[in-house]
Amino acid sequence: MVDTERGSSPDPGPPPHNGWRQEYWKKNLRLMIVLLSIWFVVSFVCGILFIEQLNTIEVFGFPLGLWFAQQGSIYTFIVLILVYTLRMDRLDDEYGVAERDEEGKRL
């Protein structure tokens, strides 16, 4: 029945089953948590907390702790972005939400 005072439509009932969306989002969150944890370990733990211990090791004449603090976290972040995009492409294909044009090529 239509509520004439507010002009609203009838109650549509329960929302449609969106279990696949919840599963998709859980997998996305799990991936993000794992990748951000790796970045945290490389940037904070290796670059700040264990810098003195890592500085005893030299790679190409530079202390390893300094390398982690200056460049390692940046390189790691770039690699993690690449991993995230590749994994999300697979996840999008798995759930049928990949963005493609009429020919089936990625946008």
Image: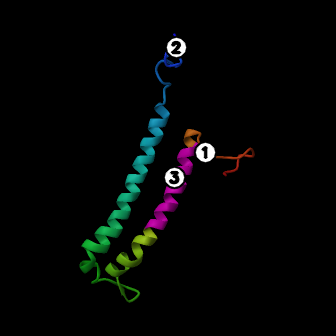
Position of residue 95 measured from the top left corner of the image (x, y, whole percent): 55, 39
Judged by depth in the image, the label closer to the viewer, 1 or 2, is 2
Please tell me whether residue 6 belongs to the stretch shown in magenta.
no
**Does residue 47 lie above or below 7 as drawn?**
below
Q: Viewer-proximal residue, 61 or 17? A: 17
Question: Residue 92 occupies which quadrant of the picture?
Answer: top right
Left or right of 91 on screen, residue 34: left
Q: Marks 1 and 3, how far apart in space?
A: 12 Å
Above/below status of 105 relative to 16: below
Residue occupied by mark 3: 87
Relative to 87, is 48 above or below? below
CA gap, disc 1 and disc 2: 42 Å
Q: Image check: 41 left or right of 76?
A: left
**Which residue is more in the foreground, 17 or 93?**
17
- Residue at left 53%, top 46%? 91
The amino acid on which the numbered mark 2 sits, given as a three-letter code, is: Thr
Image coords of residue 21 (percent x, y): 48, 36
Q: Which residue is mark 2?
A: 4
What residue does disc 1 label?
Answer: 98
Q: Main secondary structure of the magenta part?
A: helix
> What is the secondary structure assignment of the residue under circle 1?
loop
- Of mark 2 and mark 3, the one earlier in the sequence is 2
